[in-house]
Image (cartoon, rainbow, N blue to C red):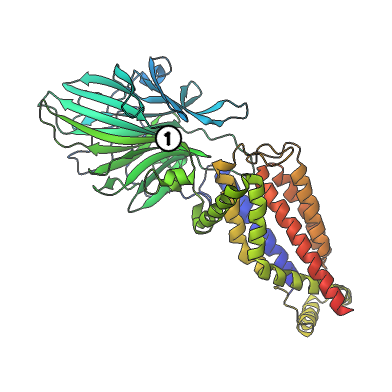
Amino acid sequence: MDTKRTILWAVFSIAGLLLYNNWLAYEGKTPLFGSQSMSKQEAAPVSGNEKKSDVPVSTANTNNTAPALAPKAIPASMAQLANKERFTLQNDVLAIEVSADGANVVSATLLKELEADKKPIKLMQVTPGHQYFARSGLIAAGNADLPNHTSEFKLQTSGKDGSGRPFLVVASERGGVTLEKTFILNPSSYVIDVMHRVSKNNAAIGPLVLYTELVRDGSKLDESEFYSTFTGPAVYTNKEKFNKLEFTDIEKNKIAIPKQVPAGDPAWVAMVQHYYASAWIPSDKLNRDIYAGKIDTNVYRVGIQTPLEDIAPGKTTTETARLFVGPQQESTLEAIAPGLELLKDYGYLTILAKPIFWTLERIYEYVHNWGWSIVILTFLIKLLFYPLSAASYKSMARMKEVQPKVMAMREANKGNPQKMNQEMMALYKKEKINPLGGCLPMLIQIPVFISLYWVLLSSVEIRNAPWILWIHDLAVPDPYYILPVIMAVSMWVQTKLNPTPPDPIQAKVMLYMPIIFSIMFFFFPAGLVLYWVVNNILSIAQQWQINKMIIKRAM
């Protein structure tokens, strides 16, 4: 058996798996890891794709089936949102605009998260090219004409409350029902408290249901062709935990969502994209129903319906929901709602990725530089795997030591590969060399490397974070490609320290590997490339030292 060929193909299989995974994500398909999405061939009912009204129908007293669409023409409100009067609310980190048409949050600007041109990121907006907003309203059995996201709301009052929190109150009356929405922002918070105060003067109106929705078009973010991150809806329940819903699966009605959430269980719905997210988090004191669907050409929604307690005419009830709009910072998300930190998704390797990021954060608290934090973390990981790496490098050094004998065997047995393999195995046994000794320790470390890859790719904390000199943002590619070039050189040095494959084709492949990987890393964020560069340099130092020790022992 040609064990070197086995080792070579093992390495290329892993690299190919990574590339295939990223291709799946880039094509909008479910990746093998790094993106958990809920997709089933036999779909549960969801909001349909028909061009009908985007006002949901109440699930109350309908055996809790998934909500359908009302049989009306699409309201003009979606197109009008960009032109209607808006009411503004702002704290030190978040500025929002609430439309008079529907009292929808149609603009959300993250004041401390900057674009490349140093302008604050506008996460939610309604423009001809992009639609992303949050809305809420009332529905009832029979689809009565009630205050919803198409109604005209009037400003009642605004200002700051007794705690200094900015707020605004808007209200609308329809069909004998009044809906008053109060938006409150806490200092330094990305969470908006949205109180829905409902009063009913029409006894003929059946049980009322509050719906809270996130609406977004299906456009993906403009990212590198060599990696892609998830964009789309997500849902969380206490029973089924966190799941993503692909736009393509919604389009084909191939999603299954946990529709019913009992009182007392936490649940929320979200819209996720790279680094940022929004989420509706209703209170858990009542039963709720989750739904998702397509409402227009390339426009999708995910929402929660909360059946309200029965309101007698002349009486009032209040139901509060929280709306999160901000960056996926783990420490911030954990404090908002159960499971919300899962918006920052590491996929199937979360069990490894979370402690890695925790360690990275602890290092940053001391050095106050994410670049140096990555360097130190790489040292620590290398130290942790030192025994495995040492065993691997010793095996490769011993393989290199007997390389002349292996080449002679190959030359002597050109026409008899079976005899050549038998003699090679006998040589390895005589020299006490495990031909797989250099491969197995590396394979054990692969899950850690993949976890760190997702940590560095997913962490908004690294966005706009400088390192030294020309690296001003670790979340974007090196502007001068210096780190990828250094990585290519370091990989080339590593190939020279390792035994040359006796097969000429294998030798050429190993020679071109640094070039192939460098082309990929030209488009990777600088933080990722920095990790690989430091790891390679440490590996070279360790391999060189082990080679030197073995040579000295042989003299």
Residue 146 appears in view: no
Quadrant of the frame with the N terminus? bottom right
Image side of residue 162 versus residue 489, left or right: left
Looking at the image, which residue is at 81% across and 55% down? Answer: 492
Total numbered circles: 1
Q: Amino acid at mark 1?
A: Ser
Does residue 364 appear anywhere in the picture?
A: yes
For the C terminus, the image quarter is bottom right
Q: Is residue 202 left or right of residue 297?
A: left
What residue is shown with label 1?
A: 189
Indicate the position of residue 328 as horizontal and vertical percent values.
49, 41
Location of residue 116 (image quadrant): top right
Residue sitting at x 35%, y 46%: 257
Foreground pick, 325 / 160: 160
- Residue 254: image x %, image y %? 40, 45
Q: Is residue 2 left or right of residue 61?
A: right
Dot 1 falls on a residue whose secondary structure is: loop
Q: Tell me the quarter of the picture where residue 431 sits.
A: bottom right
Q: Residues within 10 Å of mark 1 (few under 14, many from 20)?
A: some
Q: Quadrant of residue 222?
A: top right
Q: Residue 183's spot in the image, x, y percent?
A: 33, 27
